[in-house]
Amino acid sequence: MQVRAGGEAINVAVKGRVILNRTEHIVAAAVLGLGIAFVPKLVARPHLQDGSLRALLIDWCPEYPGLFLYYPGHRHVPASLKAFIASLREAYPMRRPAN
């Protein structure tokens, strides 16, 4: 795995017996003390706030501005896509820029 901070990059050989591919499982394993989780802060936030997890290697963790959804145009948006967008906005409320 390669990690970066500023202009510096290092390769880290990660050996382990637990391999997970779902963020909620990764966080659950970290809470149980099975290892370090590299997950979006949004996912880890409740556990960081209640103290069951703590942030490590903060200088090596890039900040992401948020979620983005790209789709063609605003005309004739299918009802299913409108529902998906509404559920994302409800699950991940964001601060909208002031006009």
Image: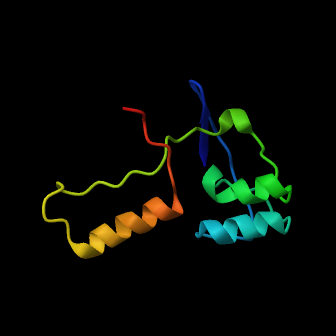
Residue 83 shows up from this direction: yes
Q: Position of residue 83 (x, y in %)?
A: 34, 72
Residue that lies at the very extreme toward the left in this rendered image: 75
Q: Pick out the residue farthest to the front.
A: 99
Residue 21 lies in what quarter of the image?
bottom right
Residue 89 is drawn in which quadrant?
Answer: bottom left
Asked whether 33 or 91 is in front, the reply is 91
Q: Which residue lies most toward the top here?
A: 7
Left or right for 71, reference 24: left
Specify how the rendered protein is coloured. Answer: rainbow
Residue located at (29% from left, 54% from top): 70
What residue is rendered at 18% in x and 56% in y?
74
Instruction: Please state which of residues 23 and 49 is positioned toward the viewer in this rendering.
Output: 49
Instruction: Answer with left or right where residue 19 lies relative to residue 53.
Output: left
Residue plotted at (75% across, 39% down): 57
- Give the percent coordinates (x, y) of residue 3: 61, 40
Q: Nearer the viewer, residue 37 or 46?
A: 46
Say whether residue 87 is left or right of residue 47.
left
For residue 41, side relative to residue 53 (left or right): left
